[in-house]
Amino acid sequence: MHKRLLTILIALLTTLLPLSASCNSSGGSSLRVKILESINHDTNIYTQGLFIEGGTLYESSGQYGRSFFRSADLKTGKTIKTFSFPAAHFAEGAVMLNNRIYILTWMEKVVYVIDKTTFKELGKLSNPREGWGLTTDGTHLIMSDGTGNLYFNDPMNFMTKKILEVKLNGKPVDQLNELEWIDGEIWANVYMSDSIVIINPQTGVVRATVNCSGLLPASMKTSKTDVLNGIAYDKASKQIYLTGKYWPKLFRISVQ
Ligand SMILES: [Ca+2]
Protein backbone atom coordinates (compact mmCIF):
# COMPACT_ATOMS: atom_id res chain seq x y z
CA MET A 1 0.00 0.00 0.00
CA HIS A 2 1.13 3.55 -0.78
CA LYS A 3 2.85 4.94 2.33
CA ARG A 4 0.82 8.18 2.30
CA LEU A 5 -2.45 6.27 1.95
CA LEU A 6 -1.42 3.98 4.82
CA THR A 7 -0.68 7.01 7.02
CA ILE A 8 -4.11 8.49 6.25
CA LEU A 9 -5.77 5.14 6.95
CA ILE A 10 -4.00 4.78 10.33
CA ALA A 11 -4.94 8.37 11.24
CA LEU A 12 -8.55 7.67 10.28
CA LEU A 13 -8.65 4.46 12.32
CA THR A 14 -7.13 6.21 15.35
CA THR A 15 -9.86 8.84 15.10
CA LEU A 16 -12.65 6.33 14.72
CA LEU A 17 -11.59 3.77 17.34
CA PRO A 18 -12.48 5.80 20.46
CA LEU A 19 -15.92 6.39 18.97
CA SER A 20 -16.56 2.73 18.35
CA ALA A 21 -16.82 1.95 22.03
CA SER A 22 -18.63 -1.21 21.20
CA CYS A 23 -17.61 -4.82 21.13
CA ASN A 24 -17.98 -6.91 18.03
CA SER A 25 -18.54 -10.56 18.44
CA SER A 26 -17.27 -13.61 16.63
CA GLY A 27 -18.09 -17.29 16.98
CA GLY A 28 -21.61 -18.54 17.62
CA SER A 29 -24.21 -15.86 17.00
CA SER A 30 -23.17 -12.22 16.84
CA LEU A 31 -23.81 -9.68 19.54
CA ARG A 32 -22.87 -6.05 19.87
CA VAL A 33 -22.02 -4.36 23.15
CA LYS A 34 -22.55 -0.65 23.69
CA ILE A 35 -21.29 1.45 26.59
CA LEU A 36 -24.16 3.11 28.45
CA GLU A 37 -22.24 4.50 31.42
CA SER A 38 -18.61 4.80 32.57
CA ILE A 39 -18.07 4.55 36.32
CA ASN A 40 -14.77 5.21 38.10
CA HIS A 41 -12.85 2.07 39.04
CA ASP A 42 -9.87 2.00 41.40
CA THR A 43 -6.77 1.16 39.32
CA ASN A 44 -5.22 -0.62 42.32
CA ILE A 45 -7.78 -3.40 42.02
CA TYR A 46 -6.63 -6.57 40.30
CA THR A 47 -10.22 -7.62 39.59
CA GLN A 48 -10.96 -11.29 40.17
CA GLY A 49 -14.59 -11.61 41.25
CA LEU A 50 -17.29 -9.06 40.47
CA PHE A 51 -21.00 -9.12 41.30
CA ILE A 52 -23.90 -6.88 42.35
CA GLU A 53 -26.42 -7.51 45.12
CA GLY A 54 -29.00 -5.04 46.41
CA GLY A 55 -27.61 -2.27 44.23
CA THR A 56 -24.12 -2.60 45.76
CA LEU A 57 -21.01 -3.65 43.85
CA TYR A 58 -18.82 -6.39 45.35
CA GLU A 59 -15.33 -7.11 44.08
CA SER A 60 -12.31 -9.24 44.98
CA SER A 61 -8.74 -8.18 44.21
CA GLY A 62 -5.90 -10.69 43.80
CA GLN A 63 -2.10 -10.91 44.22
CA TYR A 64 -0.14 -12.33 47.17
CA GLY A 65 0.21 -9.93 50.08
CA ARG A 66 -2.35 -7.53 48.62
CA SER A 67 -5.55 -9.54 48.28
CA PHE A 68 -8.79 -8.06 49.53
CA PHE A 69 -12.53 -8.09 49.00
CA ARG A 70 -14.64 -4.95 49.00
CA SER A 71 -18.12 -3.54 48.67
CA ALA A 72 -18.45 -0.32 46.67
CA ASP A 73 -20.97 2.30 45.63
CA LEU A 74 -22.18 1.39 42.16
CA LYS A 75 -22.59 5.02 41.09
CA THR A 76 -19.28 6.46 42.34
CA GLY A 77 -17.10 3.34 42.46
CA LYS A 78 -15.97 4.30 45.96
CA THR A 79 -15.11 1.54 48.43
CA ILE A 80 -17.53 1.09 51.35
CA LYS A 81 -16.06 -1.86 53.26
CA THR A 82 -13.12 -4.25 52.89
CA PHE A 83 -12.06 -7.73 54.00
CA SER A 84 -8.34 -8.56 53.91
CA PHE A 85 -6.66 -11.91 53.31
CA PRO A 86 -3.47 -13.36 54.79
CA ALA A 87 -0.40 -12.57 52.65
CA ALA A 88 -0.13 -16.20 51.52
CA HIS A 89 -3.67 -16.22 50.10
CA PHE A 90 -4.37 -14.99 46.56
CA ALA A 91 -8.05 -13.97 46.30
CA GLU A 92 -9.99 -15.11 43.25
CA GLY A 93 -13.66 -15.31 42.18
CA ALA A 94 -16.48 -14.38 44.53
CA VAL A 95 -20.25 -14.60 44.73
CA MET A 96 -23.13 -14.18 47.21
CA LEU A 97 -25.63 -16.94 47.95
CA ASN A 98 -28.18 -17.01 50.81
CA ASN A 99 -26.66 -13.92 52.48
CA ARG A 100 -23.20 -15.46 52.53
CA ILE A 101 -20.29 -14.33 50.42
CA TYR A 102 -17.98 -17.03 49.07
CA ILE A 103 -14.48 -16.04 47.95
CA LEU A 104 -12.06 -18.42 46.24
CA THR A 105 -8.31 -18.47 46.62
CA TRP A 106 -6.17 -19.37 43.62
CA MET A 107 -3.98 -22.33 44.66
CA GLU A 108 -4.49 -22.31 48.41
CA LYS A 109 -7.48 -24.69 48.27
CA VAL A 110 -9.42 -22.45 50.66
CA VAL A 111 -12.84 -20.91 50.07
CA TYR A 112 -13.64 -18.09 52.48
CA VAL A 113 -17.22 -17.71 53.68
CA ILE A 114 -18.05 -14.27 55.10
CA ASP A 115 -21.22 -12.54 56.27
CA LYS A 116 -22.67 -10.21 53.64
CA THR A 117 -23.30 -7.37 56.10
CA THR A 118 -20.46 -7.50 58.61
CA PHE A 119 -17.81 -9.18 56.39
CA LYS A 120 -17.07 -11.35 59.46
CA GLU A 121 -15.56 -14.70 58.56
CA LEU A 122 -18.13 -17.48 59.04
CA GLY A 123 -15.84 -20.34 58.05
CA LYS A 124 -13.77 -21.92 55.32
CA LEU A 125 -14.48 -24.62 52.77
CA SER A 126 -11.97 -26.85 51.03
CA ASN A 127 -11.54 -26.70 47.26
CA PRO A 128 -9.50 -29.51 45.66
CA ARG A 129 -8.93 -27.49 42.48
CA GLU A 130 -7.46 -24.14 41.49
CA GLY A 131 -9.97 -21.38 42.14
CA TRP A 132 -10.59 -18.94 39.28
CA GLY A 133 -14.15 -17.65 38.71
CA LEU A 134 -17.29 -18.08 40.78
CA THR A 135 -21.01 -17.50 40.22
CA THR A 136 -24.30 -19.12 41.21
CA ASP A 137 -27.50 -20.43 39.66
CA GLY A 138 -29.21 -19.90 43.03
CA THR A 139 -28.44 -23.47 44.13
CA HIS A 140 -24.82 -24.27 43.30
CA LEU A 141 -21.55 -22.40 43.50
CA ILE A 142 -20.41 -22.57 39.88
CA MET A 143 -16.63 -22.43 39.60
CA SER A 144 -14.01 -22.22 36.86
CA ASP A 145 -10.45 -23.47 37.38
CA GLY A 146 -8.66 -22.19 34.29
CA THR A 147 -9.66 -25.19 32.18
CA GLY A 148 -12.67 -25.53 29.89
CA ASN A 149 -14.74 -27.08 32.69
CA LEU A 150 -17.26 -25.49 35.03
CA TYR A 151 -17.88 -27.18 38.40
CA PHE A 152 -21.31 -27.05 40.05
CA ASN A 153 -20.51 -27.26 43.76
CA ASP A 154 -22.64 -27.69 46.87
CA PRO A 155 -22.49 -24.46 48.94
CA MET A 156 -22.52 -26.47 52.18
CA ASN A 157 -19.29 -28.41 51.62
CA PHE A 158 -18.05 -27.45 48.13
CA MET A 159 -18.54 -31.04 46.89
CA THR A 160 -18.84 -31.15 43.09
CA LYS A 161 -22.31 -32.21 41.92
CA LYS A 162 -21.78 -31.71 38.20
CA ILE A 163 -18.93 -30.96 35.78
CA LEU A 164 -19.87 -29.05 32.63
CA GLU A 165 -17.54 -29.18 29.64
CA VAL A 166 -17.77 -25.89 27.74
CA LYS A 167 -17.53 -26.11 23.96
CA LEU A 168 -17.42 -23.58 21.16
CA ASN A 169 -18.14 -25.01 17.72
CA GLY A 170 -17.61 -28.49 19.18
CA LYS A 171 -14.17 -27.69 20.62
CA PRO A 172 -13.30 -27.17 24.31
CA VAL A 173 -12.84 -23.55 25.45
CA ASP A 174 -9.78 -23.19 27.67
CA GLN A 175 -8.95 -20.62 30.37
CA LEU A 176 -12.48 -19.85 31.52
CA ASN A 177 -12.16 -17.19 34.19
CA GLU A 178 -14.57 -14.69 35.81
CA LEU A 179 -18.19 -15.85 35.66
CA GLU A 180 -21.66 -14.36 35.83
CA TRP A 181 -25.08 -15.99 35.79
CA ILE A 182 -27.26 -13.78 33.58
CA ASP A 183 -30.90 -14.74 32.98
CA GLY A 184 -30.30 -18.49 32.85
CA GLU A 185 -26.98 -18.39 31.00
CA ILE A 186 -23.36 -18.26 32.16
CA TRP A 187 -21.11 -15.49 30.89
CA ALA A 188 -17.38 -16.23 31.19
CA ASN A 189 -14.26 -14.18 30.54
CA VAL A 190 -11.67 -16.15 28.60
CA TYR A 191 -8.39 -15.34 30.38
CA MET A 192 -5.75 -13.37 28.45
CA SER A 193 -8.27 -12.46 25.77
CA ASP A 194 -10.87 -9.80 25.12
CA SER A 195 -13.52 -12.47 24.72
CA ILE A 196 -16.57 -13.30 26.77
CA VAL A 197 -18.37 -16.54 25.99
CA ILE A 198 -22.07 -17.04 26.73
CA ILE A 199 -22.68 -20.62 27.83
CA ASN A 200 -25.78 -22.80 28.04
CA PRO A 201 -25.56 -24.23 31.60
CA GLN A 202 -27.33 -27.45 30.60
CA THR A 203 -25.29 -28.37 27.51
CA GLY A 204 -22.07 -26.36 27.87
CA VAL A 205 -22.53 -25.05 24.33
CA VAL A 206 -21.33 -21.49 23.68
CA ARG A 207 -24.03 -19.57 21.83
CA ALA A 208 -22.02 -16.37 21.37
CA THR A 209 -18.45 -15.13 21.69
CA VAL A 210 -18.15 -11.41 22.28
CA ASN A 211 -14.87 -9.70 21.37
CA CYS A 212 -14.47 -6.68 23.67
CA SER A 213 -11.12 -5.49 22.32
CA GLY A 214 -12.33 -1.89 21.94
CA LEU A 215 -14.03 -1.63 25.32
CA LEU A 216 -11.30 0.25 27.20
CA PRO A 217 -10.05 3.09 24.98
CA ALA A 218 -6.31 3.14 24.30
CA SER A 219 -6.18 6.63 25.81
CA MET A 220 -7.13 5.14 29.20
CA LYS A 221 -4.54 2.37 29.14
CA THR A 222 -1.22 2.54 30.98
CA SER A 223 1.66 0.08 31.27
CA LYS A 224 -0.12 -1.31 34.33
CA THR A 225 -3.47 -1.95 32.63
CA ASP A 226 -4.19 -5.67 32.53
CA VAL A 227 -6.79 -7.92 30.88
CA LEU A 228 -10.56 -7.71 30.69
CA ASN A 229 -11.92 -9.59 33.70
CA GLY A 230 -15.10 -8.87 35.59
CA ILE A 231 -18.74 -9.34 34.70
CA ALA A 232 -21.53 -8.29 37.06
CA TYR A 233 -25.29 -8.41 36.54
CA ASP A 234 -27.74 -6.31 38.51
CA LYS A 235 -30.82 -8.53 38.50
CA ALA A 236 -33.08 -5.74 39.76
CA SER A 237 -32.29 -3.27 36.97
CA LYS A 238 -31.25 -5.95 34.42
CA GLN A 239 -28.02 -4.09 33.75
CA ILE A 240 -24.66 -5.67 32.89
CA TYR A 241 -21.31 -4.24 34.00
CA LEU A 242 -17.81 -5.07 32.73
CA THR A 243 -14.32 -4.13 33.88
CA GLY A 244 -10.74 -5.42 33.89
CA LYS A 245 -7.69 -5.83 36.11
CA TYR A 246 -6.34 -2.38 37.08
CA TRP A 247 -8.86 -0.73 34.73
CA PRO A 248 -9.82 2.90 35.49
CA LYS A 249 -13.45 2.28 34.50
CA LEU A 250 -16.34 -0.04 35.15
CA PHE A 251 -18.68 0.03 32.16
CA ARG A 252 -22.45 -0.42 32.20
CA ILE A 253 -23.22 -1.91 28.83
CA SER A 254 -26.05 -3.16 26.67
CA VAL A 255 -25.96 -6.13 24.36
CA GLN A 256 -27.75 -6.48 21.04
CA1 LIG B 1 -19.12 -12.10 38.19
Image (spheres, rainbow, N blue to C red):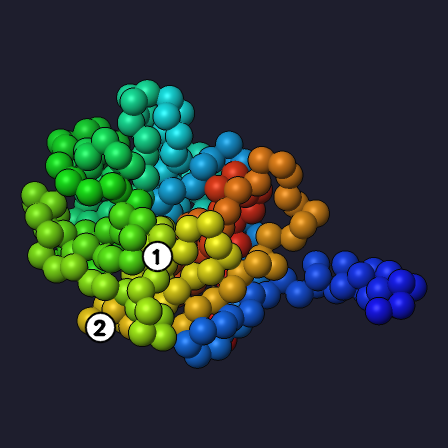
The x, y position of residue 239, in whole percent, is: 43, 62
Q: Which residue is pictured at 37% across the width and 22% down the height?
A: 65
Count of residue discs: 2
- Asked if the residue at label 1 sits under 8 Å from ligand 1, the reply is no
Viewer-side label of 1, 2 = 1
How many neighbours does mark 1 have within 10 angstroms: few (below 14), some (14-19), or many (20 or more)?
Answer: some
The tag on residue 15 is: none
Q: Secondary structure at mark 2?
A: loop
CB at disc 2 and ligand 1 closer than 8 Å: no
- Name the one closer to the observer, 64 or 61: 64
- Of the two numbered discs 1 and 2 on the same chain, state the one appearing first in sequence: 1
Q: CA distance from mark 1 to mark 2?
A: 16 Å
Image coordinates for residue 192, horizontal then vertical, percent:
46, 50
| Res. 203 mark | 2
Q: Amino acid at mark 2?
A: Thr
Residue located 57% across and 58% down the image: 213
Q: Is residue 188 visible?
A: yes
The quarter of the image holding the N terminus is: bottom right
Residue 150 position, x and y percent, is: 23, 57
Residue that carries the numbered disc 1 in the rendered image: 174
Q: Quadrant of residue 151?
A: bottom left
